[in-house]
């Protein structure tokens, strides 16, 4: 199991904002939506391009390159041209800090 990585303070992001952090060599996009935090890999499964700079529409992120949509809460793909989900990472708030870890190899 990998260690938890500090992302930011619990109140550092406003709703609709995100930050990208590196976790064990993988870029992870952490979003704040309606006061809750979510973490997904910062890579579109269609072509591997970063996704964090895409438009946020409610709890959906739209890939800035080709328009695929993903659920930020679960990583589920919602529209083509992507057909595979994005990995969603475990996230917690500990001592006022948002933390994320890579659970893919647990």
Image (cartoon, grey):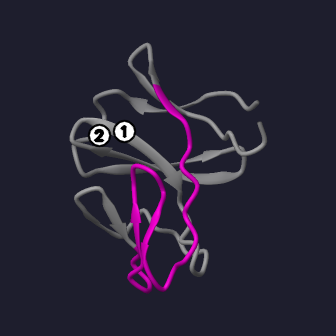
In this rendering, is residue 7 above or below 85? above
Q: Are marks 1 and 2 in contact (CB under 8 Å)?
A: yes
Height in image: 52 above or below 5? below
In the rendering, at what x and y percent does residue 95 appear? 43, 13
Q: Give the position of the N terminus as an image quadrant.
A: top right
Q: Which residue is mark 1?
A: 37
**Residue at image x 52%, y 69%?**
50
Residue range in magenta is 63-92
User: Which residue does the image show at 54% across and 49% down from the upper left?
Assistant: 88
**Mark 1 or 2, nearer chain start:** 2
Q: Quadrant of the C terminus?
A: top right
Above or below, comparing residue 2 to residue 14 in the picture: above
What numbered label is drawn on residue 13? 2
Disc number lying in front (1 or 2): 1
Q: In the image, is 56 to the left or to the right of 67?
A: left
Residue shown at 52% from the left, 79% from the top: 82
Q: Secondary structure at mark 1?
A: strand
**Helix, strand, or loop for circle 2?**
loop
How crowded pointer 1 is (Cα within 10 Å; few <14, some 14-19, many 20+) is rated as many
Give the side of residue 13 with respect to residue 83, left or right.
Answer: left
Q: In this rendering, would 24 be left or right of 6?
A: right
């Amino acid at each position: 199991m990998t260690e938890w990585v500090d992302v930011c303070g619990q109140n550092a992001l406003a709703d609709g904002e995100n930050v990208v952090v590196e976790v064990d060599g993988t870029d992870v996009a952490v979003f704040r939506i309606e006061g809750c935090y979510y973490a997904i890999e910062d890579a579109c499964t269609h072509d591997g391009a970063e996704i964090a700079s895409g438009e946020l529409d409610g709890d959906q992120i739209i890939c800035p390159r080709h328009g695929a949509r993903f659920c930020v809460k679960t990583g589920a793909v919602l529209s083509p041209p992507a057909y595979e989900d994005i990995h969603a990472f475990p996230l917690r708030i500990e001592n006022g800090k948002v933390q994320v870890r890579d659970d893919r190899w647990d």
